[in-house]
Image (cartoon, grey):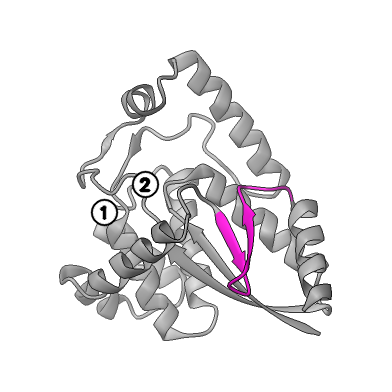
Amino acid sequence: MTHLKIDFVSDVSCPWCAIGLASLERALERLEGDVKPELHFQPFELNPAMPPEGQDITEHLTHKYRTTPEQQAQAREAIRERGAAVGFEFRKEGRSRIYNTFDAHRLLHWAALEGGERQHALKKALLKAYFTEGRSPADREVLAEAAAQAGLDVARAREMLAGDDYAAEVREREQFYLENGIHAVPAVIVNDRHLIQGGQPPEVFERALRQIAAGA
């Protein structure tokens, strides 16, 4: 069995990151017995200057990407279908707002230190809260509930979020990936060397991981 270190660089407000994670999980299921993955979730903020209260999603996408509401509706439906194909549910009406995600990344950093599968479980809980349930990842109560779902100490999560724990560590990691050429997510980095970019289908992840494992 081949050990693979997998860094999943992403943001919890990125729909293609939700699709990419679900696809990667399916690929890893197909590779069970052949590879042993060590999965780490690394921070990337699509909108680091976003205020906690967020911004209307139509206004945000129109300003950032110069798309029309009609184009956004088409893209939203395509994303919903891609998500359904890999078992991730997007709200049919889509997101109403885009939010700041820095606290979510601090919480994910702490979850990694707690060990086991807790960071992975927290990441999935945060993606579900935002994309499936339409809740704000900037809301510390939402973050605390996600921590509880992941089996983490809720009192400690609230205490950590109330301060600035792990802020420097998250910013250091974000800067590291920017300096190493990561400017779009999801970015899946295997064994610190191989990059798989974007929310690829499961078969693309599977093929790439098999090739990397064979080379290792």
Q: Position of residue 7 (x, y in %)?
A: 55, 68
* Location of residue 166 by image quarter: bottom left
Residue that badge 2 annotates = 135
Real-space CA distance between mark 2 and mark 1, rounded to the nearest whole angstrom: 8 Å
Q: Is residue 199 magenta?
A: yes
Q: At label 1, which amino acid type do we have?
A: Asp
Q: Is residue 34 above or below residue 185?
A: below
Of the 4 image quadrants, the one containing the N terminus is bottom right
Horizontally, is 40 left or right of 36 in the view?
Answer: left
Image quarter where the C terminus lies is: bottom right
> Which residue occupies 25% across, 60% down?
140
Identify the disc placed on residue 175. none
Q: Could you tell me which secondary element the residue under label 2 belongs to?
A: loop
Q: Which residue is mark 1?
A: 139
Residue 134 shown in magenta: no
Left or right of residue 164, residue 71 in this image: right
- Looking at the picture, which amino acid does disc 2 mark? Arg
Q: Which residues are magenta?
A: 187-201
Return the residue nearer the eye: 181 or 213.
181
Query: Residue 70 location, x and y as percent?
Result: 50, 14
Check the image and report above or below for 57 versus 87: above
